[in-house]
Image: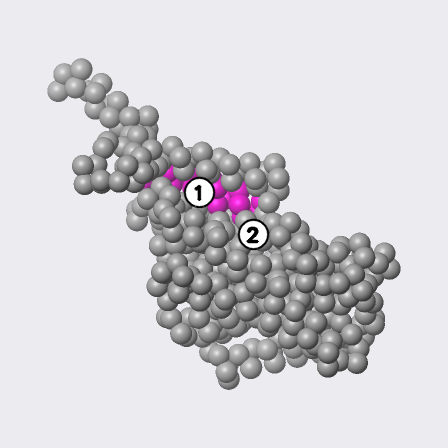
Amino acid sequence: MNIQDSLIKLWESTGIANLIQPVDPNITSGAEQFLHQYGSPIMLLICCFLLWLGIKKQYEPLLLVPIAFGGLLSNIPVADIAGAHGFLGIIYEAGIHQGLFPLIIFMGVGAMTDFGPLIANPKTALLGGAAQFGIFGALLLALCVFGFTLPQSAAIGIIGGADGPTSIYVTSKLAPELLGAIAVAAYSYMALVPVIQPPIMKLLTTEKERKIQMQQLRTVSKREKIVFPLLVLGLCIIFLPDACPLIGALTFGNLCKECGVVERLSDTMQNALINIVTIFLGLSVGSKLSADQFLTMQTLFILVLGITAFALATGAGVIFAKIMNLFSKNKVNPLIGAAGVSAVPMAARVANKVGLEANDQNYLLMHAMGPNVAGVIGSGVAAGILLALCG
């Protein structure tokens, strides 16, 4: 091999030479041909935009930054970092495909969650359940209108639970080919809770309803907080074993927090463990942001269905709170129904903020935390139902 051939071979091995793909004669559509040729540079720009959102706008930065960076790595030509033998591919197989990372995240969420407001006012669990309507509403739309398969529709619908780890867990089991788009949609809409929810909440409530002040919550005993996760897990074992991996991880983390005798374990789950897994989770999800998987019409449909699911979940929670008031002596502020989605504690803070705008003495945060943490359980239960139906 002469020096000229060596230089040509060196050039052909560079990223610049492989950034733009050659024309594929088997592709007849102009748009598809364009995406085939320029998919990698387009995805690199999209991932840079996601990095900007995470760093500059602070939209769910703990996950959006590693997801976006994983997307950059997966779209580097030639390197095959996201392939079966690349390090992102290995991480994905071990942590996402096997369902390990979302479960560890749920342990950390459980260790950071206080179920006291829900225990003090158990009827707010109904609001967390009502908000799951968004999941099944979006599922039906995806199946009947957009032509997705039942497993794909179930994975898309779970976006309405506003729970990133649950979305990743369900999608990895039912529709792994959609993981990148669903993960980006789920975390993007979670970050946009303060933008998406208030207009829906105000549209569905009157000024008088938003001014409703609720009674102070009772004090919850330590014994109740210890028994609660065991009770939730027991009910799950009896009625919906498919949800036990998620609910079991959540309740184990919460029990470690509340029992008071394993502070080191609780602290590890709340901090070091969840942070380590978040890094690997984000990078491995980003490995599915390759051009051939992300730059499709399906991705656009998923983004539309995702925000529809989120809007339906918010609206269902508010409407169900209004229905509860028809039969309840002690009125609930319908705004807390919007907190039935699983975005903890952001959705509760948004409900509190909108309530204060109507009445500066109307502090709804602790009341909204009841349906908010119920939404975490509800999304896990919904995931179990979908896995039982479609798995």
User: In the rendering, which numbered label is found on residue 189?
Assistant: 2
Question: Furthest residue to the top?
Answer: 3
* Residue at x-position 44% and y-position 46%: 286
Q: Quadrant of the C terminus?
A: bottom left
**Viewer-side residue, 117 vs 306:** 306
Main SS category, magenta section: helix
Left or right: 9, with 131 as reference point: left
Where residue 141 appears, as percent x and y from the top left, is 44, 63
Classify mark 2: residues with Cα within 10 Å, few (<14), some (14-19) or many (20+): many
What's the distance in space between the residues labelled 2 and 1, CA to CA? 20 Å
Residue 227, percent from left and from top: 66, 79
Q: Horizontal placement of 191 versus 148: left or right?
A: right
Q: What stretch is highlighted in magenta?
A: 61-81
Q: In which quarter of the image is residue 367?
A: bottom right
Find numbered disc 1 in the image and state the secondary structure of the residue it sits on.
Answer: helix
Q: Could you say where residue 342 lies in the image, as x and y percent from the top left?
A: 60, 62
- Quarter holding the N terminus is top left
Point out residue 110 in the picture as x, y percentages from the top left corner.
61, 65
Picture residue at 61% right of the left edge, 80% below the top? 231
Residue 229, compared with residue 171, is above or below; it is: below
Above or below, comparing residue 102 to residue 119 in the picture: above
Question: Is residue 114 visible in the rendered structure shown here?
Answer: no
> Which residue is labeled 1 in the image?
70
| Nearest to viewer (mark 2 / mark 1) | 2
Q: Do the residues labelled 2 and 1 touch (CB within 8 Å)?
A: no
What's under tag 1, amino acid-wise? Answer: Gly
**Residue 389 appears in the figure:** yes
Q: Is residue 87 above or below residue 325?
A: above
Instruction: Check disc 2 and report its element: helix, strand or loop.
Output: helix
Give the residue at the far bottom of this rendering: 238
Give yes or no for residue 338 being in the magenta stretch.
no
Residue placed at 48% from the left, 79% from the top? 240
